[in-house]
Image (cartoon, coloured by chain):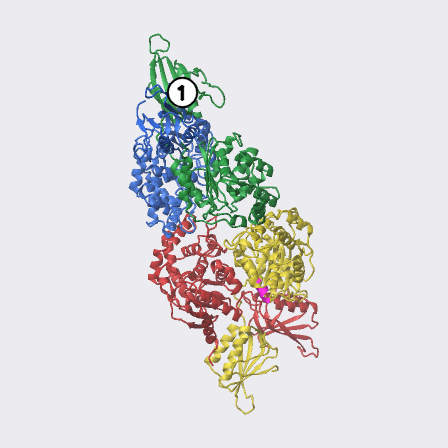
Chain colours: A blue, B green, C yellow, D red
Amino acid sequence: MRTPLPDYLAEVLDTCRDDESGTLADYIPELADADPSTLALTVCTIDGILYTVGDGDAEVTIQSISKPFAYALALADHGLDAVLEKVGVEPSGEAFNEISLESDTGRPLNPMINAGAITVHSLLDDERVRTGFAAFAGRALTVDERVMNSEIETADRNRAIAYMLRNHGIIDVDPPEAVAGYTRQCSYLVTVADLAAMVTTLANAGVQPHTGERVVPRWVARQALSVMTTCGMYDAAGDWFTTVGIPAKSGVSGGLVGAVPGKGGAAVLSPRLDAHGNSVRGIKVFERLSRDMGMHLLDSPPPARPLAHTTAMVDGDGDGNQDTAVFELQGAVDFPGVERLLRDLAEQPPSNSTLVLDLGHVSEVRDVGRRMLLEGVRRLSLDGHHIILIDPDDLLEGPEGPIEVGDGGDAEVVRAR
Amino acid sequence: MRTPLPDYLAEVLDTCRDDESGTLADYIPELADADPSTLALTVCTIDGILYTVGDGDAEVTIQSISKPFAYALALADHGLDAVLEKVGVEPSGEAFNEISLESDTGRPLNPMINAGAITVHSLLDDERVRTGFAAFAGRALTVDERVMNSEIETADRNRAIAYMLRNHGIIDVDPPEAVAGYTRQCSYLVTVADLAAMVTTLANAGVQPHTGERVVPRWVARQALSVMTTCGMYDAAGDWFTTVGIPAKSGVSGGLVGAVPGKGGAAVLSPRLDAHGNSVRGIKVFERLSRDMGMHLLDSPPPARPLAHTTAMVDGDGDGNQDTAVFELQGAVDFPGVERLLRDLAEQPPSNSTLVLDLGHVSEVRDVGRRMLLEGVRRLSLDGHHIILIDPDDLLEGPEGPIEVGDGGDAEVVRAR
Amino acid sequence: MRTPLPDYLAEVLDTCRDDESGTLADYIPELADADPSTLALTVCTIDGILYTVGDGDAEVTIQSISKPFAYALALADHGLDAVLEKVGVEPSGEAFNEISLESDTGRPLNPMINAGAITVHSLLDDERVRTGFAAFAGRALTVDERVMNSEIETADRNRAIAYMLRNHGIIDVDPPEAVAGYTRQCSYLVTVADLAAMVTTLANAGVQPHTGERVVPRWVARQALSVMTTCGMYDAAGDWFTTVGIPAKSGVSGGLVGAVPGKGGAAVLSPRLDAHGNSVRGIKVFERLSRDMGMHLLDSPPPARPLAHTTAMVDGDGDGNQDTAVFELQGAVDFPGVERLLRDLAEQPPSNSTLVLDLGHVSEVRDVGRRMLLEGVRRLSLDGHHIILIDPDDLLEGPEGPIEVGDGGDAEVVRAR
Amino acid sequence: MRTPLPDYLAEVLDTCRDDESGTLADYIPELADADPSTLALTVCTIDGILYTVGDGDAEVTIQSISKPFAYALALADHGLDAVLEKVGVEPSGEAFNEISLESDTGRPLNPMINAGAITVHSLLDDERVRTGFAAFAGRALTVDERVMNSEIETADRNRAIAYMLRNHGIIDVDPPEAVAGYTRQCSYLVTVADLAAMVTTLANAGVQPHTGERVVPRWVARQALSVMTTCGMYDAAGDWFTTVGIPAKSGVSGGLVGAVPGKGGAAVLSPRLDAHGNSVRGIKVFERLSRDMGMHLLDSPPPARPLAHTTAMVDGDGDGNQDTAVFELQGAVDFPGVERLLRDLAEQPPSNSTLVLDLGHVSEVRDVGRRMLLEGVRRLSLDGHHIILIDPDDLLEGPEGPIEVGDGGDAEVVRAR
């Protein structure tokens, strides 16, 4: 058997291939000379498996897609507050190369417009970008010096922006050098698979899915994805979010990346751009993927199997009395599930002296569910029940360490049924 | 045992109660006379249970929180394209009462600013709003005529907007009447529990969680929540989304609602507003809830129990050969899980003639997972395996009806293990 | 002999007639139906003689050309400060129908944009406009009710503006009524001669040149002309002022009026408009007139005959000594002339005991010149000279009454040489 | 006798001296360290006499007042069209350091904002500025290198503007060099008398009033003054023009210059600035001067002595018949005067065979008046009259050379009465 995913992805590409609308970026000859027919798609699973179809060997400069990754590196290095002081997180409603500074402070509205990206770059250095991007991609990347030099030559608008930023005290480095560094950041060569691996690192809470390296902290990945959600597609952010519904970022060389947190990421390469500067076929591919796979963040999940329990009354201590109730939990230990379980227990308090909660079949434990469950256990314990928690997979163990039932409560934890 | 949720919610309220910053809306006396100390919170579960703490009896006019619900009704009545023709979905980066029309078409940028909301209202009528809001809330709502009349009297800015809209051909009704109708829409009296029930209807894909009534189609709920995500908090949308991370809407009378699709919704009432017009304590409460409960849409879920399988070799037909392999699946039948399963099967093809897939312990089935699994089953069947699917809960049954394995494939489905 | 002016004006019209570029205003059928070939020019002298060539019988609605006249009436009725409180005097750099309100106060930037003109109209009433316009034109004007009603029907943008104005507290009347009144003001029917007479009233310091009626005070005429200078041609004000260089106002029905203070005024009628909404051939005609006649306010006057004097030494008292110096002044008694005269007298003090200043041949007396001359006389008198002023035309008599030489000075004034 | 002007000017300064409102420019230490009490005024007559009162020795850097003079030099060197292609002439309605480029072309709106001034400077070179400014001032000026270097150091905003300009193809020089050159242009040290001499050169149609050197052509002076009229006082242009009513330019070091074409110029120095960046006491002084001297361009001149004639019937050829009419003209030979004269002659045609027009007492001849008069002469000649023109001062001689009466006409010109 061959896994069906590549066939599906190839079919998706095929249905989008005929769309030849849009135009190449042409402000430098190197971009204008790109092959407009290039089309490639990579889906990267959360555990780092890459499925690539189309022109997987094509390399382009990363351009604006570098922005969220540089932002993530800056957040990781300087902390949230220090970065927020320099760059906001609000959508600008404007095109990518508008200056879009806050009128009072001169702070760029967000890190996805050039003003914000130049500011973010000024918080890094070339070496940090090089090693950071390599960590995101899972391999060393090289700079296309020819593209970089051509871009630097025509980067007057960005230099204007950089001088305006220094005028407002947002950056304090030499503006042309800041632009040169930022342009270098934009000139790393990537394949569609590199892009997919990079964005999946954000989807995987900051851990590169293939190498397993933690590239940025969890909160940084969430912050970068949040800003991609509201600002990643320029002045088409609302249109993208209603139809595709995931954090994304596009670049002028035709790349487009999207992430589904905890699930995976994808990237498309197709150089013809629409009026907003987004890849025409890239958008089409993502719309198809989102529709087929239910990727939209706001799709209410289909009727899931909620946290359920089967109860058995047993004679736990062999005294002839069925004084023990065994609750075998199934499904997700999350807010809705635990809320419902505790509601049931509150409405119909068990009479058994011993209560066994068997977590051997639960599928997932959310922090809020874990904490609510333990609070429930504490209360049942205070009501006089003897509680036994069966947790063979240590699911109840929280980020802070072993289980704590809380004031006055008590529970016996066993790992084997 | 008492369920711990109310205690937790009360504690959240208590930690926010002391913040007396912000000011009351004062453009009409009725709002300026509100009790600034009012503080209430309701959490509504996806199955319609309401947990209310604080001033649950306080009633306020719904104001701008009416916008997403009216938008949803208009979408349901007229379809997506007809509504998009009149109102866009892009964040404006501006305050709520800016005119914010597209410069070429005059189309309001989105339905959460007044221009868009007046346009949306012009697609409805008073009776439709009345019955629609009642369906969202699960009970009939009444209009505060005194507030409405006071607002209508001072609604010159909105009348200006409405005339500008008719000037651009966006609306064709009498502008002052459109404003009067819109103001009536904003004047429905609601409690914090009403607000929570309404937003949870959107979180529940359009079905009122308590009454079970489908108020709007699934796609409409998603569209309304999408626009709330990018435009619901005015020019603080980016700040809200990075910190709280869920679709939300605020109103000038101090209400604030948020939805977690498939999980539930919540509302806070506290009339003091910050500079953006959002409830100060409302934001605090949601920040706390989001942090505690992991509500942020882009929080990668914690290490979930992935789709796993235990394999057992059995002599299914009693011929003495272990010619049957039983795969007991656990966890979520979603894209990542099925992709991994099929990858394993592709890499290490089973030699057994009969393959049993037992879905009796899976927690959740996503459409894409179901379809990938069936395609895998088809391919295994074509490879010559006899496939038996154990699906006691009809989880594999899709929205279109009974299981179809697809061209050339075959599988036996049994409901009992 | 026929006076050559009509021939000259006819020739000017002829050279501009062939230009058929531009388009008719078409937002109401009545304007779209105008005869695009209409072309008429009137020059009005400062003493009220009208020279009209071309389609002198054509009548059009006055439209925006009403703005400076209504502004003048409002100034006359309410005073400068009261009007400035409501409407500014700054160019907006924007098209005529932009809202252009000051961001903090909501005050319209100037009275030549619609927002300002509606505000100005709200300070008047229909009857005041009717009688005021009649006084400017020198004859009663009538309203084209058909055009007026058609405009009122489509005046949604203006109604939007009016509501925005009331929202900011700039007007307090009913907005649709304010717009209706303003539209009535714009619907007075005028010929090109009416327009010329009206603007010449402003050029003539507020006095209708033919009837001799003082329609508005001198300061009002200057204020209206000042605002026409910087704001009269919308966003083409700078282009107009550099090339034509006089206060002007254009209207959407193809009228264009210009004033040369103290000299006269002119009006052109030609309905095809350029992109700024100004009459294409109207501008051409004025450019030609300005070039030919040296109308540009900043054309340094050509070498004028400066204030000059011939000095004669006479034996005034018959004692045999030429103890009297007679200065026969010629040219303008203005700042430059008197400054030079006094400088000469300071540098080469006359030794004669009696000084005669003969003003019988001066061409013009400016107030500053008169006052400087009298101050010089006072000083010469204090130096011991006996001064005789010959002033047959009472030119030295100031606005405040008879000549006053000032503290300590003395002079004998005679009217005959 | 002492000429009274200095006393008057000193009194004007005294009445304004007490106003200590406003603040020093402080973006560089050198400006912040200026003596706020500095107050000086120079009035320069059209023939180059300078009256200075107050701190006449104080030197400041010329700053933005350099803009109209550099603009004039660029116009003189490159012609109107070449300069208009790079810089517009429309008021921006914005502060001086706004970028204010036309959205489509990137052309700065006018040469009085920084973007326009940097563009204008790019059309010159340092040496041209040095010699040009010296010609305007009538003496060599030196650069304050300390101020210049300090300004260059902090000129990030201007460098941003310059890069934006090169991005739009408006300038093609190195942006930081363009800014350095422009800053040098702004750093010339001037006294209040220098400023007055410079602006009076523009008032004098381009001829330095003291040296007599023609610095720029007449049309250039008019163009520079025109742009000063609409754009010289930034976003207070309208307020200035309604109250003072002359072309002007202010600078951040507290200078303020104004011109009355054909009459003279003035400059004030007082470093405290209002919110628009204009000298507080500078404006006060000019308001007083304008009021006292009737400088406002739109003040209708006071009842001037119009072109008048006395007629005498004489027996010119001694044949006993009074067949000769002598018209002795007085006043200005301008449009209104000649129009009236010719109208009289048309209405009451003289019966005498010989007509003598004596121009010996006219005060001023405008080109349009000269041409109209000659056309009248031609027509009278064609009517059969013998015409004798007495023109002792060659006033009728036009710019193109000797008198030409035109087709078919004839006249005898004599220089002595």
The secondary structure making up most of the magenta span is helix
Q: Is residue A204 above or below residue C40?
A: above
Pick the residue in front: D394 or B213.
B213
Q: Position of residue B321 (x, y in %)?
A: 33, 9
Q: Looking at this view, name the residue that lies furthest to the bottom.
A: C319
Q: Report the residue at 31% width, 25% height from top.
A: A392
Q: Quadrant of residue C400?
A: bottom right
Question: The numbered mark 1 sits on a residue in which chain?
Answer: B
Pick the residue in front: D40 or B31.
B31
Instruction: Please tell me whether mark 1 sits on a helix, a strand or a loop.
Output: strand
Q: Is residue A316 above or below residue A95?
A: above
Q: Position of residue B327 (x, y in %)?
A: 36, 18
Pick the residue in front: B267 or A242.
B267
Q: How many marks?
A: 1
Q: Is residue D271 above or below residue B261?
A: below
Q: Is residue D407 above or below residue B219?
A: below
Asked if the magenta segment contains residue C221, the reply would be yes
Image quadrant containing the C terminus of chain A: top left
Q: Position of residue A287 (x, y in %)?
A: 46, 31
- Residue for badge 1: B359
Q: Which residues lie in the magenta part?
A: C218-223
Residue D201 appearing in the image:
no
Q: Which amino acid does the dot numbered 1 rest on?
A: Leu
Pick the residue in front: B267 or C35.
B267
Asked if the magenta segment contains residue D66, the reply would be no
Q: Position of residue D362 (x, y in %)?
A: 58, 73
Residue D77 appearing in the image:
yes
Label 1: how many residues lie within 10 Å, few (<14), some (14-19) or many (20+)? Answer: many
